[in-house]
Image (cartoon, grey):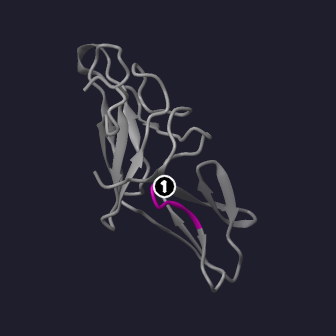
Amino acid sequence: MDLDGDGYPDIISGSWPGEIFLFRGGPGGTFSAPEMLKDKDGNIINIGGGLHEQPNGDILITGNAEFEQTSGGSVVNYHGKRIKSPPDKQIMVTGTASAVHAVDWNGDGRLDLLVGDIRGNVFLIPNEGTPSTMPSASLVSCRPATNR
């Protein structure tokens, strides 16, 4: 499906960490590097993802994060945020396993995103752009899907 109107088929994909990726198609069946889709406020879309402080002070990150060892101790990089691990607490990382489908859900001529997660929840991300644009950084918002 050509999602961005450039004449080449594109791929939209969910992931184990939960982020949604767009691979823009090009000539000869090539694809660009994956782009993480963002909401209209510029936040990376990750249904159910984010930072969650546990009652005991540990931190659970749901999404794509990288651990780093520095001279000052352990640090986790989560979408550009560097989180220092407290010496007596843990930082844990897990995923939400998103699956995504582009469809004109509300019949307005624009492709919206339906995203499912590992828990069986389904979310609607309506396209707030124009009919010729793919839901992207400034064009989408996130709210639970309604029954249809």
Residue 117: which quarter of the image? bottom left
Quadrant of the snapshot with the N terminus:
top left
Q: Which residues are magenta?
A: 47-51
Compared with 82, 74 (above or below) is below
Q: Nearer the viewer, residue 104 or 73?
A: 104
What residue lies at 59% left-to-right and 70% top-to-bottom? 52
Give the number of callouts: 1
Q: Residue 28: percent from the left, percent from the top?
A: 24, 15
Q: Residue 78: percent from the left, percent from the top?
A: 59, 55
Q: Secondary structure at mark 1?
A: loop
The furthest residue to the right: 72
Q: Which residue position is annotated with label 1?
A: 64
Residue 109: which quarter of the image? top left
Say left or right for 77 vs 104.
right
Question: Disc 1 residue type?
Answer: Asn
Say left or right for 129 vs 79.
left
Q: Nearer the viewer, residue 36 or 127?
A: 127
Q: Nearer the viewer, residue 43 or 34?
A: 43
Compared with 132, 103 (above or below) is below
What residue lies at 41% left-to-right and 28% top-to-bottom? 134
Q: Is residue 115 magenta?
A: no
Q: Nearer the viewer, residue 94 or 142?
A: 142
Dominant secondary-structure state across the stretch colored magenta? loop
Say left or right for 73 vs 12.
right
What residue lies at 44% left-to-right and 34% top-to-bottom? 127
Q: Is residue 49 magenta?
A: yes
Q: Residues within 10 Å of mark 1 (few under 14, many from 20)?
A: some
Q: Residue 102: percent from the left, percent from the top?
A: 31, 37
Residue 7: which quarter of the image? top left
Q: Residue 92: percent from the left, percent from the top?
A: 53, 72
Compared with 3, 75 (above or below) is below
Say left or right for 148 vs 110.
left
